[in-house]
Each structure stands twice: as C-alpha cells, then as structure tokens.
Image (cartoon, grey):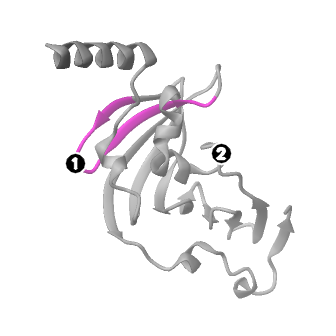
Amino acid sequence: MRRLIIFICSLAVSIAAGAAVSIPLLDRMPGHRVTFDYIYTAADGQEVASGEVIVQGNSYKLSAMGLEIVSDGTTRWTLDRKACEVLIENVDNVDPSTNPALLVMRYRDYSDRLKVHSSGEDSLDISIALSEETVARFRLSGIVFAEEGEPGDFVLDVEGLGNGYIVTDLR
C-alpha cells in the first residue's frame, strides 16, 4: 500500500511539474553521427528552409537554400559558393535557433518549449517556441545513425577555397 501511495504522489508531482518530453529517436543520437533531411516551417506554415543535416555532438553541417553551413560547435562558417562569400562567426551553445545541433542532441534542455507532433522509426515532427511570438516547426526524415567520424569534418577549410572568395570574419 505504501508503494502505491508513493507511486501516486510521484505521478502527481510529475504531472504538476510538466514531465519532461522524451523522444526515443533523439535519445539515440549522442555518440553517433546522424544524417537527416529537414523542413523548417514558420507558425504560419510557410517553409523557411529545407535541406540536409549531419550532426555529431554540438557540431553540424547543413545545406539549405544554396548555402553550406559548417560548425564545430564553437565557430560557424556560412559558405555561399554562388556569391563566393564566407561568413565566419562565433556560435553560442545555448540557442537552438543559432545551432540546430542543440535541438536534436540536447532537446531535453528545451522540453518546456517543445511539442512532438509525431515520431517514427526514421522521422520526427516537432515544434519549438523560440520566443513568445515565434514557433518553428521541424520535420526530420530519413534519419540515419552512423559511428562518430573525425571532428575535423566540421571545420571549413577557408584556405582551400582558393582566391576570389570574400571572407568576413566576425569572431
């Protein structure tokens, strides 16, 4: 009887506190290199971006709308090959809108702002409140897990781009 009372009290506290969101698919990501396609839409349903992402820890490579974005978790390089431009800037590891790796690798940190619409074997549909006015929806598909690779894969070799690129370093 005592165990039942403790269980009921624990359950009531969990419900009152808003039990943390658990997403088994995302729980598998740490310790892996994960590749997936994504579609990012605003609250009004307008597609903001789509592309492919490779995530490993706080590092990522993202391709979207003609841009290639590479981050080692500390520095972010945004490469526009068509315009021959590279933007280099520091990355904070707090805001998932500036580092999408955080959303999938440390989603529990944002569980109070996260809503799961659906989760499957290799797909996920979630929304996150970026602010009181802004809600972003992410649809991830084709999720593939692999062994972690070299950390250097998440650093852009700016020197290797050759001459003709305009490099803006904001660090």
The residue pinned by badge 2 equals: 94
Question: Residue 5, position in %: x, y?
Answer: 22, 12
Horizontally, residue 120 falls left or right of residue 36, namely left
Labelled disc at residue 28: none
Quadrant containing the C terminus is: bottom right
Of label 1 and label 2, which has the lower sequence position? 2
Left/right placement of residue 136 relative to residue 161 reads left
In the picture, residue 65 is in which quadrant? bottom right
Q: Residue at x 47, y 42 (%)?
A: 107
Q: Amino acid at mark 2?
A: Val
Magenta residues, start to end: 116-130
Mark 2 closeness class: few <14, some 14–19, many ≥20 residues within 10 Å: few
At 71% across and 56% down in the image, what residue appears? 91
SS label for mark 2: loop
Tell me residue 144's x, y (percent).
31, 61
Quarter holding the N terminus is top left
Secondary element under disc 1, as helix, strand or loop, is: loop
What amino acid type should be assigned to the residue bearing mark 1? Glu
- Residue 127 drawn at (x, y percent): 47, 31
* In the image, farthest residue toward the front: 2
x then y, percent, for residue 161 = 71, 83
Mark 1 lies on residue? 121
Judging depth in this view, the residue of 137 and 71 nearest the camera is 71
Queried whether the magenta region covers residue 126, the answer comes back as yes
Q: Magenta segment, principal secondary structure?
A: strand
Query: Along the line of sight, which residue is nearer the eye, 158 or 128?
Result: 128
Q: Residue 152 colored magenta?
A: no
The image shows a total of numbered marks equal to: 2
Which residue is rendered at x = 40% and y = 54% of the image? Answer: 37
Q: Is residue 41 above or below residue 79?
A: above
**Vertical position of residue 77 compared to residue 51: above or below:** below
**Separation (CA) of disc 1 from disc 2:** 28 Å
